[in-house]
Image (spheres, rainbow, N blue to C red):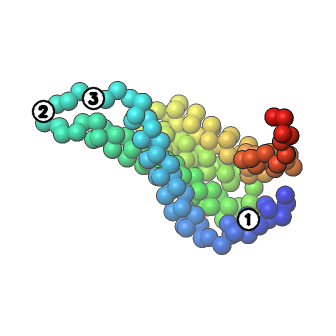
Amino acid sequence: MDADLADRRYLEDNDTPMMKTIKAATTGFVTGTVFGTIVATWKDVPRVERNVALPGLIRTLKMMGSHGLTFAAIGGVYIGVEQLVQHYRMKRDFVNGAVGGFVAGASVIGFKNRSISTAISAGAALAFTSAVIDIGGQTTRVDNGKEYYPYTTKKRSAVE
C-alpha cells in the first residue's frame, strides 16, 4: 500500500503546479457539464415561446455551462491554492488541501450565491472533506485484501 502511495506521489510531482491547476479545472468543467446535463433532465421543460427556437435545448445548454463553469472554478481554485500553500509552507500534508478547499468553497460558492454565511459553510464543508480524505490516505476505498471479479471464480456443480 505504501509503495502505491509513493508511486502516486512521484507521478504527481512530474506535473507543474500550473499544469495541475489546468487539469483540475478541465476535469471540473467536464464533470460539471455532465452533472448539468443530468440536472437539466430533472427540471421541467419550459413552455414553447414564439421567439425562442428549441427552448429545452437552450435551457439545457445554459445549465450545462453554468454547472461546468462552477465545477471548473472550484477545481482550479482548490488545486491552485493547495499548490501555493504547499510551495510556501514547504510541507505536503492535509493542511494544504484544507486551505485550498476552504478558499475554493468560500470564494466560488459564496460569490455565486452572494452570501457570507453560504461562503463560510461551503468553505468549511470542502475543507473538512479534503482534510478527511487526505488524512485517510488519499482514497475513499478501504483495501480489505479481497479481489472482486465481474464473474465467479468458483466452479458450479452440475446440480445447480
Tell which of 60 and 96 is nearer to you. 60
* Residue that mark 3 sits on: 46
Q: Can see residue 90?
A: yes
Q: Residues within 10 Å of mark 2 (few under 14, many from 20)?
A: few
Q: Which residue is drawn at 13% across and 36% down?
A: 51
> On the picture, is 99 further left or further right than 148?
left
Q: How many marks?
A: 3
Q: How far apart are marks 3 and 1 (CA)?
A: 48 Å
Q: In which quarter of the image is residue 159?
A: top right
| Of pointers 3 and 1, the one earlier in the residue sequence | 1
Q: Earlier in the sequence, mark 1 or mark 2?
A: 1
**Contact, mark 3 vs mark 1 (Cβ under 8 Å):** no
> Residue flagged by tag 1: what amino acid is it?
Arg
On the image, numbered disc 1 is attached to which residue?
9
Q: Which amino acid does label 2 sit on?
A: Arg
- For mark 3, give the secondary structure: loop
Asked whether 150 or 80 is in front, the reply is 150
The residue most toward the bottom is 14
User: Residue 66, how many percent across, how many down?
Assistant: 39, 43
Residue at 67% x, 41% y is 129
Residue with the mark numbered 2: 50
